[in-house]
Amino acid sequence: MKREGIDFPIEWRSGKGWLVLIGGTTDFWRGTEAVDRAAIESMSLDAPIAFVPAANCPPEYGTSFLAVYERLGTPDGYVVPIVSRESAQDVKNAALLRDAGLVYLGGGDTTALLASMTDTPSCEAVGEAYERGAVICGMSAGAIVLSAWGVSMGAGVLEGWGWLPRVLVSVHHDAGREALFESAMREHPDMLGVGLAEDAALALGPDRQIERWGDPDIVIRRGAKFDD
């Protein structure tokens, strides 16, 4: 599996787990197997895995995720049925997230994910799981919500949860997104810009590890005022 240490100035929320920002995939996790294997390697196998479909994920996303991760050797898992703000307030859903050893925030509609989960018991539960040692994977929309800001082709520049307080992320990053990425960096010159291509992941560990998982490169841009 591809895990490579990298070095650049980045800050993130403290915890005993890993934060994994994944640029995206278009092939139901076939392209992210190296990332998925590294995530499994980094989690406790004594706790279940949890998939969160709050970004308006298609119904088959959750079941296909569980099947892929089962094949790769994870414990049993479940889809946490968060599809609205009401369901994110449900204490039963929050408990499922709090108990997980790996939480996967599925990709899709970033605005839906933000609207459903921000400042809810379920969001707090993801943070508690991470603080205790869970791996938190943010796929595409999930990567945006973990960051301070994120570039969405459909919705523009969105404010995330700020677990990476000085990072602006561009997901599904390629040449076609460079102009929007650069524009966002001009709007937020105090940020470190991180461009994540399909199947690439930035992984941040409990001992301040900074790693690239998967094969594609990660694009780094320093905002004009980042070092001020």
Image (cartoon, helix red, strand yellow):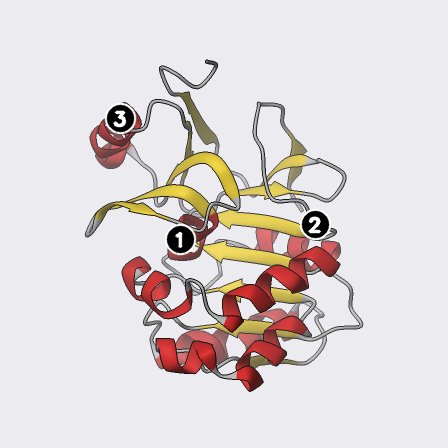
Where residue 52 appears, as percent x and y from the top left, is 48, 72
Quick one: label 3, few (<14), some, or many (20+) residues within 10 Å? some
Residue 38, above or below 46: above
Instruction: Name the amino acid, label 3.
Output: Glu
Q: Secondary structure at mark 1?
A: loop
Residue at the location (67% across, 47% down)?
1
Q: Secondary structure at mark 2?
A: loop
Where residue 22 appears, as percent x and y from the top left, is 48, 49
Where residue 219 appears, as percent x and y from the top left, is 43, 28
Residue at the location (48% across, 61% down)?
29
Q: Nearer the viewer, mark 2 or mark 1?
A: 2
The residue under label 3 is 182
Q: Find residue 212 and report its image quarter.
A: top right
Nearest to N terminus: mark 3 or mark 1: 1
Instruction: Name the amino acid, label 1.
Output: Ser
Q: Label 2, label 1: how many angstroms apart (C-alpha)?
A: 22 Å
Residue at the location (63% across, 27% down)?
6
Q: Is residue 35 left or right of residue 154?
A: right
Where residue 15 appears, as percent x and y from the top left, is 70, 50
Q: Label 3, label 1: how many angstroms apart (C-alpha)?
A: 18 Å
Instruction: Name the amino acid, label 2.
Output: Gly
Residue 160, above or below 56: above
Quick one: label 1, few (<14), some, or many (20+) residues within 10 Å? many
Q: State if disc 1 and disc 3 touch (CB < 8 Å).
A: no
Residue 119, above or below 216: below
Any mark on residue 15, and which? 2
Nearest to N terminus: mark 3 or mark 2: 2
Q: Find residue 115 and report its image quarter.
A: bottom left
Any mark on residue 206, and which? none
The residue under label 1 is 140
